[in-house]
């Protein structure tokens, strides 16, 4: 995680995150009826439609499933940048920006370990940084 005072951090979608023991986690849900874990949180379990759901903090480490380099993308991201799919141990696949790597992905490979970080996504209308989750390769 990029260490900051989290009280002053403006998240892109604040309900997706939770701080615990000085770390930021993505927060999903676990069904009490069938045990299915999902992200983001939903009103009912997507597997069994039960409404008996508990908050569940997702693993901070995962595996890079696939990735690509984007040269022309959304207006608030200057290319090139890397995005990809990350598989978490909870059998959740997330689409995410990949950071702390070569902007053309030359130092990335499929199936490499990655970890969650909190990093700047863009600036808001007032010029303040807006943060989101990203993944970065784990340096061994």
Image (spheres, rainbow, N blue to C red):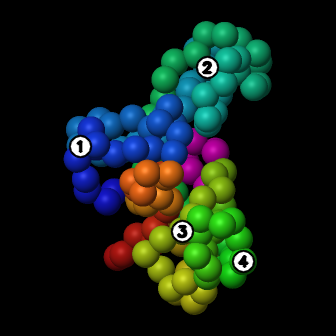
Instruction: Quote the CA–CA distance across marks 3 and 1.
Output: 22 Å
The answer to whether the residue labelled 3 contacts the one labelled 4, judged by CB atoms less than 8 Å apart, is: no
Residue to which mark 2 is pinned: 31
Q: For the point 43% across and 51% down, which residue is it? A: 126
SS state under label 1: loop
**Which is more toward the observer, 92 or 104?**
104
Q: Is residue 120 visible?
A: yes
Q: Is residue 116 left or right of residue 80?
A: left
Q: Dot 3: few (<14), some (14–19), or many (≥20) neighbours within 10 Å? A: many
The answer to whether the residue labelled 1 contacts the one labelled 4, judged by CB atoms less than 8 Å apart, is: no
**Which is more toward the observer, 105 or 14?**
14
Instruction: Quote the CA–CA distance across marks 2 and 1.
Output: 26 Å
Q: Is residue 78 left or right of residue 73?
A: left
Q: Indicate which disc, 4 or 2, sits on the residue closer to the N terminus.
A: 2
Q: Which residues are magenta?
A: 86-92
Q: Indicate which disc, 3 or 1, sits on the residue closer to the N terminus.
A: 1
Residue to which mark 3 is pinned: 98
Q: Position of residue 127 (x, y in %)?
A: 42, 57
| Front: mark 3 or 4 | 4
Q: For the point 28% across and 43% down, which residue is it? A: 8
**Image quarter for residue 98?**
bottom right
Residue to which mark 4 is pinned: 72
The quadrant the C terminus occupies is: bottom left
Q: For the point 66% across and 10% down, which residue is it? A: 51
């Amino acid at each position: 995680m990029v260490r900051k005072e989290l009280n002053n951090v403006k998240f892109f979608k604040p309900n997706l995150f939770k701080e615990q023991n000085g770390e930021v986690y993505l927060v999903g849900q676990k069904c009490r009826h069938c045990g299915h874990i999902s992200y983001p949180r939903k009103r009912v379990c997507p597997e069994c439609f039960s409404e008996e759901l508990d908050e569940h903090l997702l693993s901070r480490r995962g595996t890079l499933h696939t990735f690509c380099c984007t040269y022309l993308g959304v207006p608030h991201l200057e290319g090139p940048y890397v995005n990809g799919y990350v598989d978490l141990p909870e059998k959740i696949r997330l689409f995410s920006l990949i950071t702390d790597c070569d902007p053309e992905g030359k130092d990335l490979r499929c199936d490499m370990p990655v970890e969650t970080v909190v990093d700047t996504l863009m600036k808001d209308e007032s010029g303040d940084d807006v943060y989101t989750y990203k993944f970065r390769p784990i340096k061994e």
